[in-house]
Amino acid sequence: MTDNSATAPERVATHRTVLMCRPNHFTVSYRINPWMHPDVPTDTSLAVRQWETLYAKYLELGFDVELIDGIDGLPDMVYAANGGYVLDGVAYGAKFQYPERQPEGPAYMEWFAANGFTVAEPVSTNEGEGDFLLVGDTIYAGTGFRSDTASHDELRKLYDREVVTLKLVDPAFYHLDTAFAVLDSNGGPGSVAFLPKAFDAASLGILDERFPDAIHVNDVDAAVLGLNSFSDGKNVIIAQRATDFERQLTERGFAPHGVDLSELLLGGGGVKCCTLELRR
Ligand code: ARG
C-alpha cells in the first residue's frame, strides 16, 4: 500500500447538523426504482439495527442529529434526504414524483416549520437533497428521473446561488446523490466523487471541467451505492462494501468509515439517502 500521508492534503472536519428518520415502518411494498423488488422479503428490525449504526456513527463524530417520526404506510420516509432541501434556514419542500411517496412532502414541511425553518412550498416536482447538492457556493441539481428542471429555477430564485443542472441517464442511479458525492463542501478541483457513466455527455463535460481531480468510482462500488455517502470534510461515511472507494479516500487524506445498510439498499438507498443536512 502506498503511503500518501506526506502528499495528501490536511482534511478539516466541520460540524454538521442532520435530520434522520428511524426506519420503524421500512419495507419494500412497491417498485419505483430498479433496486426495489416487492417480492423479496425485508427485515424491518434489521433495517432499524443497521440504521442505528449510522446514527451512532454520526453522534460519535460529534454531529447534531435531529429526528423526524416515521409514519406507518410511508416505508420510504427513512430516506430523509428526499424530504426537502435546507440552506440559509430556508427549507424548500419536496414534491415527490410517485404517488406512493407524495404524503412525505407535507410531513417533512410540517417538521421544518415546527423546528424554526422558513418553509418554501414547492411548485415543481423535486426530491430534495437526493437531487440537490451544495459544493462551495454552487448547487448541483440532478434531473432525468425525479426532479424536474423547473425546480432548479425555483432553487435559483430562493437561494442566491449558482445552480448547475446535471442530467442523469442510468436508471439505477436515479437521484444525484447515488452518482455524485460531496467530499469537501468548500469546493475545489478534487472536492467530489462521481460515477461518470451516470451522466449525459454535456453534464460529464461540466463535471470534468470543474472537478479535474475528482475521484471516479468503479462499477462494483457504485453497485453497492458507495457514492451515496456523507462527508464532514474529513470523515466520510460510506457503504462498507465500497472498498476501492475507501482506498481512494484514504489516499487523499480522508478518513472513511464503513457502515452496512444492506437492508436499506433493498429500497434503493444508502448512507446519504438517510441523511438530510440542515443548514440554519
Ligand atoms: N425507494 C426510494 C425511492 O425510490 C429510495 C430513495 C433513495 N434516496 C436518495 N436520496 N437517493 O424514492
Image: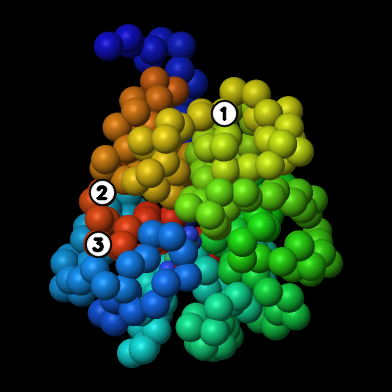
Which residue is drawn at the image coordinates 76% and 62% (left, top)? Answer: 149
Measure the alpha-carbon separation of dots 3 and 1: 29 Å
Q: Nearer the viewer, mark 3 or mark 1?
A: 3
Determine which of the numbered discs, if any, sits on residue 263 in the image. Answer: 3
Residue marked by disc 1: 214
Measure the alpha-carbon separation of dots 3 and 2: 12 Å
What crowding class fits label 2: few (fewer than 14 Cα within 10 Å), some (14-19), or many (20 or more)?
many
Residue reaching furthest to the front: 39
Indicate the position of residue 167 as horizontal and vertical percent values.
69, 50
**Which sits in the foreground, 126 or 257?**
126
SS at circle 3: helix
Q: Nearer the viewer, mark 3 or mark 2?
A: 3
Which residue is drawn at the image coordinates 58% and 35% (left, top)? Answer: 196
Chain-order first, disc 3 or disc 1: 1
Please state which amino acid type lies under the numbered disc 1: Ala
SS at circle 2: strand
**Which sits in the foreground, 229 or 253?**
229
111 relative to 38, above or below: below
Which residue is drawn at the image coordinates 57% and 28% (left, top)? Answer: 214
Indicate the position of residue 247 as horizontal and vertical percent values.
34, 25
For the image shown, how many numbered marks are present on the structure? 3
Q: Tell me if the residue at label 3 has its CB under 8 Å from ligand 1.
A: no
Determine which of the numbered discs, if any, sits on residue 148 in the image. Answer: none
Please state which amino acid type lies under the numbered disc 2: Val
Please state which amino acid type lies under the numbered disc 3: Glu
Q: Is residue 82 left or right of residue 209?
A: left
Residue marked by disc 2: 259
115 relative to 152, above or below: below
279 relative to 29, above or below: above
The answer to whether one can see residue 259 in this image is yes
